[in-house]
Amino acid sequence: MSTLWVEHASSSAAIARRSVLAAFGDAGVTGEPALDAALIASELVGNAVRHAAPLPCGQLAVSWSVDDEGYQISVTDGGTDSCAADISARLPDCQDTCGRGLRIVAELADTWGVAAEDSGATTVWARARKHD
């Protein structure tokens, strides 16, 4: 698994998008799967910047892995505010600006979820299988 540390800033979404696209290209994943992965990374970072605190180091961790079965992208932040709390459960009913990025993630990924850690950190992850 590769990890990119980015600032808790809106500009980090573009950095994550470019980094994932380049890394996937290096791994031989190109075209639509690579573009989808880059968009997922961008949306997860954007969501973390809008709705969560940074990790204690002041940054976000963007991680990804690619294998023969597909890929996984995750973003870890320092914990969420009330809008993003339990967003995975509220997503179908969310009609405001909260959750639109995660709707994109849900459409592009085969599965996604949220994991809360004892430290207070939150990781939002998405997985996509390799499609022939």
Image (cartoon, helix red, strand yellow):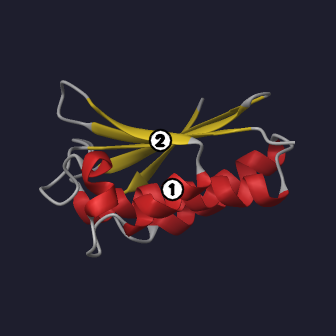
Q: Position of residue 59 (x, y in %)?
A: 33, 50
Residue 9 is drawn in which quadrant?
A: bottom left
**Apparent side of residue 13 relative to residue 22 in the rendered image (left or right):** left
Q: Quadrant of residue 77?
A: top left
Q: Amino acid at mark 1?
A: Val
Q: Residue at x 45, y 61 (%)?
A: 103
**Residue 112 makes an appearance in the image:** yes
Nearer-the-camera pick, 126 or 73: 126
Please give the name of the residue rendered at 38% of the width and 70% of the height, measured from the top-left corner: 10
Vertical placement of 105 versus 131: above or below?
Answer: below
- Reply above or below: 19 against 27: below
Outermost residue on the bottom side: it is 96
Disc number at residue 112? Answer: 2
Residue at position x 75%, y 28% from top?
69
Callout count: 2
Report the residue that reaches farthest toward the top: 118
Label 1: which secondary element? helix
Q: Give the quadrant of residue 117.
A: top left
In what element is the residue under mark 2? Answer: strand
Report if residue 8 is visible in the image: no
Tag shown at residue 85: none
Extreme residue in the front direction:
93
In the picture provided, is 90 more to the left or to the right than 81? right
Give the residue pinned by disc 1.
105
Amino acid at circle 2:
Trp
Q: Can you give x and y, in whole percent of width and height, for residue 104 in the image?
A: 51, 63
- Residue 97 image position (x, y, % from top left): 29, 75
Discs 2, 1 touching: Cβ within 8 Å? yes
Front-most of 87 and 21?
A: 87
Left or right of residue 58: residue 22: right
> If the image is split into quadrants, where does the N terminus sit?
top right
